């Protein structure tokens, strides 16, 4: 598969998440696809469907924006840096993510996503007690800066 095709597939993957187009997303991945992210590892189509049910229930108005370096591709692997904005638990959030992709033939076989969960929790905490707890952890981590 050409590098241009890999870039197009990564773009289609995030676009399908934005549009909640499960059929499109499933057409891009292998049967043994795994998505590793801070919520866990979700492998196979059944697990992906379960994760997408949860994800779309808890996250709305998603938008992805390329940031940082261009998509970097080497062989069957690629790195994609982007900013995600949307609504989680009724609160607007924006956070940076880094995703690595592994391709197998003409499909995406594996995605690993990393982002700062504490920053996300800080933004998504709406009631006073969760916000106080998260801010306490953040303040302790930044003590002395």
Image (cartoon, rainbow, N blue to C red):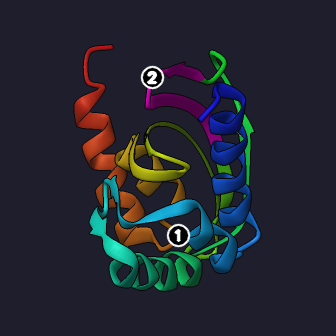
- Which residue was labeled with disc 2? 75
Range covered by the magenta-colored residues: 72-83
The percent coordinates of residue 57 (x first, y second) are 56, 84
Q: Say if 30 sits above or below 52 in the image.
A: above
Between disc 2 and disc 1, the foreground one is 2
Question: Measured along the vertical axis of the image, is residue 135 above or below residue 102?
Answer: below
Q: Which mark is residue 52?
A: none
* Quarter of the rendering occupied by the N terminus: top right
Left or right? Give the position of 48 relative to 26: left
Residue 19 forms part of the magenta stretch: no
Residue 45 on image: x %, y %: 40, 78
Considering depth in this image, is 78 or 63 the residue closer to the camera? 78
| Magenta stretch: helix, strand or loop mostly | strand
Q: Is residue 80 above or below residue 90?
A: above
Q: Quadrant of the C terminus?
A: top left
**Residue at the location (26% across, 15% down)?**
144
Q: Secondary structure at mark 1?
A: loop
Q: Position of residue 108 (x, y in %)?
A: 49, 51
Q: Position of residue 4 (x, y in %)?
A: 72, 29
User: Is residue 75 inside the magenta stretch?
Assistant: yes
- Picture quadrant of residue 21: bottom right
């Amino acid at each position: 598969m050409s590098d241009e095709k890999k870039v197009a597939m990564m773009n289609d993957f995030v676009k399908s998440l934005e549009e909640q187009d499960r059929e499109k997303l499933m057409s891009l991945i292998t049967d043994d696809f795994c998505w590793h992210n801070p919520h866990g590892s979700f492998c196979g189509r059944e697990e992906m469907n379960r994760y997408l049910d949860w994800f779309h229930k808890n996250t709305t108005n998603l938008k992805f924006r390329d940031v940082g370096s261009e998509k970097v591709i080497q062989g069957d692997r690629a790195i994609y840096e982007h900013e995600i904005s949307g609504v989680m638990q009724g609160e607007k959030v924006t956070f940076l993510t880094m995703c690595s992709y592994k391709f197998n033939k003409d499909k995406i076989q594996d995605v690993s996503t990393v982002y700062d969960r504490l920053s996300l929790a800080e933004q998504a905490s709406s009631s006073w007690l969760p916000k106080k707890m998260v801010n306490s952890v953040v303040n302790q981590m930044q003590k002395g800066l």
